[in-house]
Image (tube, rainbow, N blue to C red):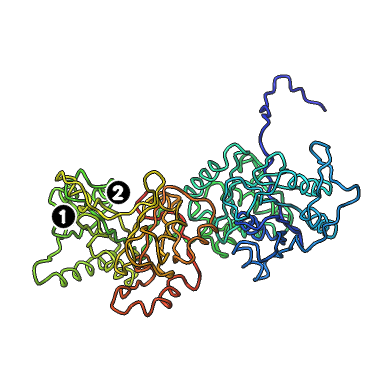
Amino acid sequence: MLHSSTHATFPEAHGGASLLLAFHARPHSAVLILGADQLAATRAFSALESDYEVVVIAPGGRASVCAELAWRADHAQLIIVDSESGSTNTPPGGSFRSPFTGTPVSGYDRDAHVLASYLEDHHPLVRLVFITDTVLDGSSSSVTRRSRASAEQLCGVCRARGVPVNTTDMPDLCDFTVPAAHRVPGTPLQLAVTTNGQGCRLGTRIRRELVASLSHDAGTAVLRVGELRRLARADGEAEDDHHASTPNRPVPQRSLSVEETDAERSARRMRWVAQISEYWSYSHLSSLTKEGMQSILSGDGLGLPSKSSRHGLVVDPSSPRGKIFLVGSGPGHPGLLTVATRDILTTHADLVLSDKLVPEAVLALVPKNIQVRIARKFPGNAEGAQQEMMEAAVDAARRGLTVVRLKQGDPTIYGRLGEEILYFREKGFESVVIPGISSALAGPLCAGIPESFIVCTGVARQGNDVVLPGYERRRTLIILMGVARIAQVLQTLQTLHPADRRDGPPYPAHTPIATIERASMPDQRVITSTLAHVMTALESNGDQRPPGMIVIGWSVLSLWGSGDITVLNKGAEQDDESRIERWLGGQSWRVTEGFIGGWEG
C-alpha cells in the first residue's frame, strides 16, 4: 500500500558532507602507505590499532624512514618495501594515462611500478592506500615533496584496481579523508571529527575539546556495556535497539507466569541494555561487575550493591576518604586570590591549616563554622611545626575531611611544596595543588618597581637567535614560547661552541626536559623526556598545541612517583643514568594528556 506524503515534511539533504564509516579489518587485510615521514608513522599506527597489516613503500627502504617506522619494522609490526630495488620497466604503451584528465603522463616512476606489482600480487587483501609524502606544511622529513604527476600515477594504479586512496594535501586525488580521531586508551571508544577539508587544524582543536569534555569513565563504560550486550544475546539472536529513536518504545509487560523463548528473553535483555546505556551515569556503568551484569539481565536489581549505587538513598557506612589541597593565597590582598582558591576556602574546606604569613584579610573569607589552625612556626620550632601540620592534614583526611593547606604566595616557590606532596603521597593521599600569584612576581609590581625575573623566551626580536643561559645543575630553565623553535633551542643548549648564543657550559644530552602545552586547560599535554629524545617525542605525538613552554632541569623529575630529593646532592650526577631509567620506566619519553587539577570543575 502506498502512503501519501503530500503533507509530510522530511529533512532536506544538503550536499558537501562525508559518509562517515568505521571499517573493520578482515583477516590479513592490509593497508599500504607510500611515505617515510612521521605522518606515515601516524597512519601506520592508526592502521595497526585497527588490526590491519601495514606495508610501507619508501625509496631507500628501512634506512630512509623515520625512527618510529624503523622501530615498528624491527619489532615485526609492519613491512617496509624499498621502491628503489624494484624494476623500473615502463608498462605496455610506454606511458601512463591520467584518470583525471585523460592525457598521457610520461615517466611511469618506480614507486608506481612497485605499487602496481604489489597490488597485482595482493590485491584482494589491500583495503586502503595512503600517500603521505605529498604533505605541504613542511613537517615531512622527506627531502622533496612528491610531484602531482607522480601522485596521479599512484592514484591511477589504485583506482584501476578499485582500491580507495588518500593523498595528503591533494584533496581532488582523495577517495576518502582522515578525520581528527582519538581513541580512549585501552577501550573500544573512538571519537572522530572532520571539517571536510575546510580546516584540518580547527578540526584537531575541536577534537581535543570534545575529548577534554568527555567523562573519564566513558571508555570503561563502553567496555562494560559491550560485555553486557554479549551476555544479553547469549541465549539467542535479538534486534539491537540502537537504531530506535528512543529506548522507551512500548513493549508488552513481562509476565512471570509465561515462559519466554530464548529470542524473547534476548530481546528483553537488549531493551534493558539500551535503557541503562541511555540513563545510567558513566561512573555507574564503568563500575559494573560480572555479578552485577547478571543481576541486571535477570531483573533482580540494578547491578551494584545498594551502598555503591549513585541512584540509591543509602549512605555508605564505610569510612569516607578526604582530600588534601595545597593552596597558594597570593601576595596578600584578598582581591589577588585566584577564583579557585576563593572557592575552595569559602565552599569546600572542612579544615584550613594556614601558614602564619597568610594575612588575616584572607583568613576572614573562611566561613566561621570552619576550623582554622595557624602553623606555630616560631624560631627554633620550624621543623616541629612543619611536621605537626603535615600530620594534622593526614589525620583529618583519614576522617573524610577536605583539608586546605594554605600557603603564602605560590606554594611552589620556597613553600616546601615538594616535601609535603611526597609526605602525603607516602601516607596514601595524592594532594591537589592550586597555584597562587607569587609575591616574587606581584610584590615588585605593587611597589612600582620593574621586575628582574629570570625567564627566557624562545622568540628573539626581528628573527635573531635567542641567547640562553648555560648549564647549571641546580638551576631550572624555563623557556616561554619555545616549543615551535625547539630544534634551535636544543642546538643552542648543547653545541660546544654556540657562537654567543649561550652564556655558559653546554647541557648534557640526558638532562630532563618537559614541554607543557595548553597549561591548566582541559587539553593540556605534557611530554617529558631528555634533550636527546625530546624532538623525536614531539614528532611522534602529532600537532603542537599552542601556547607552549619548555622546562629544562632536574626539577622535572624530582616529584615523579616516589620522588627524588637527592637529585641536587653533591655527587648526584654519578647516578644520572639509572635515575633517568627509573623516571621514564625504560622508555625514551612519557606523554601525559589532560589537566586533572582536582579543582577546575
SS class, disc 1:
loop
Q: Residue at x 25, y 68 (%)?
A: 395
Q: Is residue 553 left or right of residue 255?
A: left
Name the kind of residue labelled 2 in the image. Answer: Ala
SS class, disc 2:
helix
Which label sits on residue 283? Answer: none
Q: Nearer the viewer, residue 333 or 42?
A: 42
Residue farthest to the right, as pictured? 92
Q: Which residue is mark 2?
A: 340
Q: Nearer the viewer, residue 541 or 203?
A: 541
Question: Crowding at label 2, few (<14), some or many (≥20) Cα neighbours within 10 Å?
Answer: some
Name the kind of residue labelled 1 in the image. Answer: Val
Q: Which residue is mark 1?
A: 358
- Height in image: 208 above or below 389? above
- Height in image: 508 above or below 498? below
Label 1 to label 2: alpha-carbon separation = 17 Å
Q: Nearer the viewer, residue 566 or 56?
A: 56
Q: In x, y percent, where is residue 82?
A: 74, 63
